[in-house]
């Protein structure tokens, strides 16, 4: 590529945004929830939602894999491999039958999640190295595209499900997986080509780093972060922070249906996707001003209050609550990615953030199963889902207490220069 170094970092942002839009299809799971539950799991919402749970849970595995691979191969190839893995997961998911519904957990869930995690972590880690001056904003832009994937693919998926439905239960949903798989493969292969490392010791023109006690000088290895209390505080608080948002993402459409808003239920999926995306960008920018820790505490406090309003909101107010929870959830995703880089350094950021995302993955499994369980009990009386969102509110309050104990790590200087494959260096 013959772009100047200064312009090249924006090319990488654009490519990352395109890739993240595809990865964002995970946030339209509620479009598939009811059809998949009826077609493959005999109407059991909790079992069906485990497909989404496993995808969220294995994001961290994909992140860890990408961190290991970065020692040996260029990030563009990791992104391409992640796109291929996710694409195969979706394509194979389209062939799952009621005789072996658990295969959906392996294909859509595990393969989809690992592939998504590889591409997700690699694009974020690479972009952060290009934007040390605007880490929160750059991270917010890329992660906001993940949220916008729901806006882009909700109407696409809805149209495909209607067009491909042959009259049998879940046929439209399963065939839509097949089509989306090939879209992911094409976009991640093309976009991955542009994901490259900056030159060694790169700094943006005219920018000089300023001392910040919340940002570690040098980098901590994955083994080193596991011996710090900061890692465990960050990981567990991440689990607690995202429970309300993950419950809403998985059940936005069924909740709107149960509220008598069936005709506009798909709007709920679009609404949460839009505000999820905007929240990632806005709160990423805010955190550059207020600091990651202060921003996360603000998000947790508001989230606790909103979670209690989900089941009592009526009419179009349910969409307001959905939008607000999505807006806050997006802030958590952008801030924890930047917080990890601030505290643990840039050298192992993909691997380290993959370890932090274990909390996010665990939150996905726990929250989706809790919401699915109470949705089964609720049937059409959505008020019976109140205990699920009460649990989410309590989790958010516990997160505030936990994150309050997060203290900066004493700065250390990396002893070894980062290894970058030669084919990945900037000319």
Image: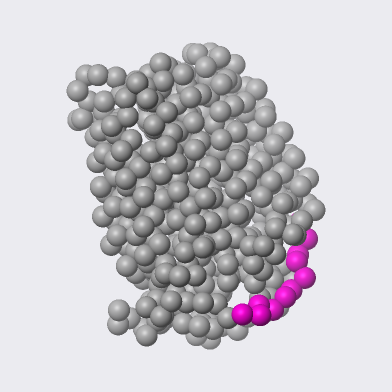
Q: Quadrant of residue 270?
A: top left
Please name the residue shown 39% across and 60% down the image: 79
Which quarter of the rendering shows the C terminus? bottom left
Q: Nearer the viewer, residue 334 or 346?
A: 346
Please name the residue shown 28% across and 32% down the image: 95
Which quarter of the rendering shows the N terminus? bottom left
Whether residue 75 can be seen here: yes
Q: Residue 75: x and y, percent?
A: 42, 67
When the figure is inspected, residue 81 is found, relative to residue 12, above or below; the finding is above
Residue 91 is covered by the magenta coloring = no
What colour scheme was applied to this rendering of the protein? Answer: one colour
When the figure is inspected, residue 139 is found, relative to residue 302, above or below; the finding is below
When the figure is inspected, residue 347 is found, relative to residue 287, above or below; the finding is below
The segment highlighted magenta reads: 406-416
Q: What secondary structure do most residues of the magenta stretch adopt?
A: loop
Q: Residue 378: x and y, percent?
A: 54, 15
Residue 411 is covered by the magenta coloring = yes
Please name the residue shown 56% across and 21% down the image: 373
């Amino acid at each position: 590529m013959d772009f100047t170094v200064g312009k090249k970092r924006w090319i990488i942002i654009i490519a990352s945004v395109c890739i993240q839009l595809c990865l964002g299809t995970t946030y339209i799971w509620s479009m598939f929830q009811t059809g998949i539950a009826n077609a493959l799991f005999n109407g059991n919402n909790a079992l069906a939602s485990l497909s989404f749970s496993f995808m969220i849970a294995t994001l961290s595995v994909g992140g860890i894999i990408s961190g290991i691979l970065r020692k040996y191969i260029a990030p563009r190839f990791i992104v391409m491999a992640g796109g291929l893995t996710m694409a195969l997961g979706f394509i194979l998911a389209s062939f799952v039958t009621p005789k072996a519904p658990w295969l959906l957990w392996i294909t859509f869930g595990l393969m989809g999640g690992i592939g998504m995690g590889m591409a997700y972590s690699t694009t974020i880690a690479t972009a952060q190295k290009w934007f040390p001056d605007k880490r929160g904003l750059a991270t917010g832009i890329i992660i906001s595209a993940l949220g916008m994937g729901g806006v882009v693919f909700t109407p696409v998926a809805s149209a495909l499900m209607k067009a491909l439905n042959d009259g049998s239960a879940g046929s439209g949903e399963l065939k839509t997986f097949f089509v989306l798989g090939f879209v992911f493969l094409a976009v991640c292969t093309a976009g991955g080509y542009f994901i490259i490392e900056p030159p060694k010791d790169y700094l943006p023109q005219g920018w000089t780093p300023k001392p910040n006690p919340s940002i570690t000088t040098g980098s901590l290895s994955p083994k080193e972060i596991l011996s710090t209390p900061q890692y465990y505080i960050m990981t567990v608080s991440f689990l607690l922070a995202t429970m309300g948002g993950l419950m809403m993402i998985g059940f936005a459409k069924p909740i709107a249906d149960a509220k008598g808003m069936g005709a506009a239920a798909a709007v709920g999926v679009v609404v949460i996707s839009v505000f999820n995306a905007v929240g990632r960008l806005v709160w990423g920018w805010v955190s550059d001003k207020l600091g990651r820790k202060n921003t996360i505490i603000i998000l947790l406090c508001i989230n606790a209050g909103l979670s209690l309003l989900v089941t009592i909101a009526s009419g179009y107010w349910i969409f307001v609550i959905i939008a607000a929870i999505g807006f806050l959830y997006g802030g958590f995703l952008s801030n924890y990615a930047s917080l990890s880089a601030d505290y643990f350094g840039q050298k192992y950021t993909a691997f380290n953030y993959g370890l932090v995302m274990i909390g996010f993955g665990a939150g996905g499994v726990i929250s989706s199963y809790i919401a699915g369980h109470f949705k089964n009990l609720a049937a059409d009386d959505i008020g019976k889902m109140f205990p699920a969102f009460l649990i989410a509110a309590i989790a958010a309050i516990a997160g505030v207490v936990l994150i309050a104990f997060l203290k900066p790590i004493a700065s250390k200087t990396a002893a070894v220069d980062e290894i970058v494959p030669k084919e990945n260096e900037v000319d």
